[in-house]
Image (cartoon, grey):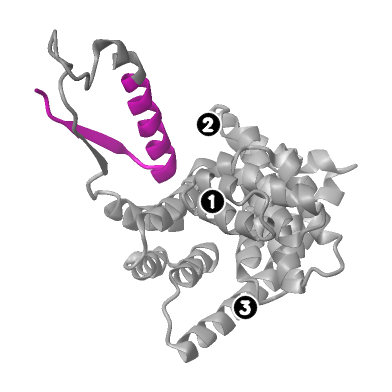
Amino acid sequence: MKLLQTEAVGFPWQMEGYRVVGKAQFRKNAYADACETWEAVHDDALDDLEANLWLGTIYQRLGKLADSDLVLRRVVENSATTPWRQAEVYALMGRNDKERWKAAWETVAAAQRQEEALRSPFLAESYTNYLLGFQQDLNHYYSGINALSLLVTQIALADASPEVWNENFQDSEEGVRQLARRKDELVKLRGSVAMSLEAAEARRQRAGKDDVWLGITLADLACLTSGSPAFVASQYRKALASAHDVDREAVFRQLTLYKQLAVMPANVAAALQVVSSWQSKPPHTLLFTGDRLDAPGRAASRFPANKVAEARQAIKDAICREVARVQKPVVGIAGGR
């Protein structure tokens, strides 16, 4: 991909070529290379919607959240951005704030985790951005389910630690009123997200197509709203039956977040039991092959001893890239000669 990028330089279609290469690099999880490619497109036209959107996601994957926010803000402020794109952008901004929120409490002791999660201003900011995304286009159920998830979490944390919740207000009475408002908002949002998902499911059925993530999101809705852990488990079992490992890992991470914060414990425990059954499959496996070092006096050099360190580092780099790509347990199998 990098070679194709360099070979596009100087041609009239250079930037279009960069777009093709940049998307391919992203799909291969080559985020650093994809970043360089899309930055070249962006430098050619700062307000390019596609470039700013791709960079918003790529910067997030690289941990450059401030840079991600900057390019996403350009998309929001662009008058050519459609409501659906606006929804996507606000959802990406919400995800950036969610990463900041998780960083505020994930490493603290379990006993203080709920309080630190509630204290972090990024919880409310992430919720607001996801909600803004859903309000841009009510068909964008991804932003809706994430807003609902964060609101459910905020309310659960506030109920568990009212004294921490009340720190945000002049007096405890105002804190009680504001929490009641959040709960009223939850009722409306829950209905809106449910309707959005029902409409999406109806469209899917008319089209006769499978949609793994729609099924997963319906299971997420059950987890957030149902009083029956058995029903929640059945929804995840059905949704994950045709899912890929990367989809199951994403579900596992979100459920683990709830578990860490003791939110919806019964539903989460039932869902995790289903997801864990899928994770009992063999781990991602790397197979190694190679050859022994050149024998002393070999006429044609093939694997000289002075290349051992270089080969070892190349193997290590390749393994690290693969581990980062699959984001799951990895084992290696190698033979000896």
Q: From the viewer's perspective, is residue 143 above or below residue 71?
A: below
The quadrant in which the C terminus is found is top left
Mark 1 residue element: helix
Q: Say which residue appears at 39% left-offset and 65% top-offset.
A: 236
Q: Position of residue 244 (x, y in %)?
A: 36, 60
What residue is shown with label 3?
A: 196
Q: Residue at x 41, y 63 (%)?
A: 229
The crowding category of the residue bearing disc 2, from other C-alpha atoms within 10 Å (few below 14, some 14 to 19, many at least 20), is few
Q: Which residue is pictured at 48% across the width and 88% down the height?
A: 207
Q: Nearer the viewer, residue 223 or 101?
A: 101
Task: Quote the CA–CA distance across marks 1 and 2.
Answer: 36 Å
* Viewer-side label of 1, 3: 1
Is residue 184 among what the camera can see?
Answer: no
Q: Is residue 281 left or right of residue 164?
A: left
Question: In the rendering, which numbered label is found on residue 110?
Answer: 2
Q: Quadrant of residue 78?
A: bottom right
Q: Which residue is pictured at 63% across the width and 47% down the height?
A: 37
**Res 48 visible:** yes
Magenta segment includes 328: yes
Residue bearing the label numbered 1: 26
Disc 1 crowd rating (10 Å Cα; few below 14, some 14-19, many 20+) is some
Are circles 2 and 3 on residues that touch, CB within 8 Å?
no
